[in-house]
């Protein structure tokens, strides 16, 4: 089964001291799929993803990536595999230009270590126009990040992940703190991940934002997988009702 998936996390366990945060979680992502990982604060979403991206090591369980069992010891290792994370604060340098942000820490250089600035600008232009679909002439490779809207910043962070050949992009509450208009823009960028043939995990506690773009939903609750649903099998209102029931009773009907 693991060979059919992009990612398979099997019986993942994690404790911090005496607190058991993940209690044998099974979670997977298919190729070219957006999975909504949802649940209330404290459900274990962030811990599960931090294990996948090399921030934490699991206490038990196995991880498979493209059918091969792997051990992820660091964030750099997860990036080498093709896993990139876009955090809710975008992890962009507000005072720097777009082209500098795209290549920050992974600059294009000559054999002698000199920056190939023209190449970085050209690649940033291609990412903006061809890959992410930016059409406004007001946004250029030399635009400063602090002048962009929240949705546009998410687009830049996603574009950066796609440029570095991420097969899986983890989106940590990408709509947090955005206006309705900016949320719509950010969700368009999320859809673009699938259009590029890649996969994503959309972490959120807000069903209304994740439902329009996800293909499948996995609900975590207090360290357990409480439910898994295909979008075609459940409406947004039904999913919300199940979340409310889970919060009230501790189980999904």
Image (cartoon, helix red, strand yellow):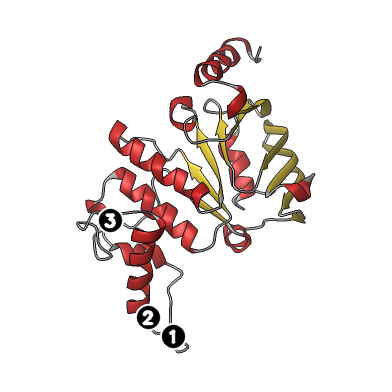
Residue 166: mark? none
Q: Nearer the viewer, residue 51 or 242?
A: 242
Tell me the SS state at disc 2.
loop
Q: Mark 3–mark 1 contact, CB under 8 Å?
A: no
Tell me the SS state at disc 1.
loop
Residue 110: mark? 1
Q: Name the residue beneath numbered marker 3.
A: 145
Name the N-terminal-most of marks 3 and 1. Answer: 1
Q: Which quadrant, please, contains the N terminus?
A: top right
Q: Residue at x 48, y 26 (%)?
A: 207
Residue projecting furthest to the bottom: 112
Q: Is residue 76 visible?
A: yes
Crowding at mark 2 (Cα within 10 Å: few <14, some 14-19, many 20+): few
Residue 238: image quadrant is top right
Q: Mark 2–mark 1 contact, CB under 8 Å?
A: yes
Q: Tally the marks.
A: 3
Residue 140 locus on image (x, y percent): 25, 62
Crowding at mark 3 (Cα within 10 Å: few <14, some 14-19, many 20+): many
Q: Residue at x 55, y 53 (%)?
A: 197
Residue 116: mark? 2
Indicate left or right for 210 with 252 as reference: left
Label 2, label 1: how far apart the Cα atoms are: 6 Å
Position of residue 109 relative to residue 125, above or below, is below
Label 3, label 1: how far apart the Cα atoms are: 26 Å
Position of residue 39 relative to residue 66, above or below, is above
Indicate left or right for 231 with 189 as reference: right
Residue 122: image quadrant is bottom left
Q: Nearer the viewer, residue 19 or 199?
A: 199
């Amino acid at each position: 089964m693991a060979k059919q998936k992009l990612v398979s996390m099997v019986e993942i366990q994690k404790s911090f001291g005496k607190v058991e945060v993940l209690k044998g979680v099974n979670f997977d992502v298919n190729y070219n799929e957006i999975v909504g990982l949802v649940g209330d604060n404290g459900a274990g979403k962030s811990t599960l993803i931090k294990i996948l991206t090399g921030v934490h090591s699991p206490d038990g369980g196995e991880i498979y990536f493209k059918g091969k069992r792997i051990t992820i010891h660091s964030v750099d290792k997860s990036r080498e595999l093709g896993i990139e994370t876009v955090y809710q604060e975008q992890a962009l340098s507000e005072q720097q230009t777009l082209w500098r942000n795209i290549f920050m820490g992974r600059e294009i250089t000559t054999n002698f270590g000199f920056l190939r600035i023209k190449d970085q600008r050209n690649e940033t232009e291609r990412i903006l126009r061809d890959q992410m679909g930016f059409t406004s002439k007001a946004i250029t490779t030399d635009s400063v990040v602090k002048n962009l809207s929240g949705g546009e910043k998410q687009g830049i962070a996603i574009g950066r992940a796609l440029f570095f050949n991420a097969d899986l992009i983890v989106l940590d509450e990408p709509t947090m703190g955005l206006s309705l208009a900016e949320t719509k823009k950010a969700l368009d960028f999320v859809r673009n991940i699938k259009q590029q043939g890649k996969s994503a995990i959309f972490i959120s506690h807000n069903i209304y934002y994740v439902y329009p773009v996800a293909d499948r939903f996995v609900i975590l609750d207090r360290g357990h997988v409480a439910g898994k649903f295909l979008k075609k099998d459940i409406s947004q209102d039904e999913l919300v009702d199940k979340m409310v029931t889970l919060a009230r009773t501790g189980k999904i009907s």
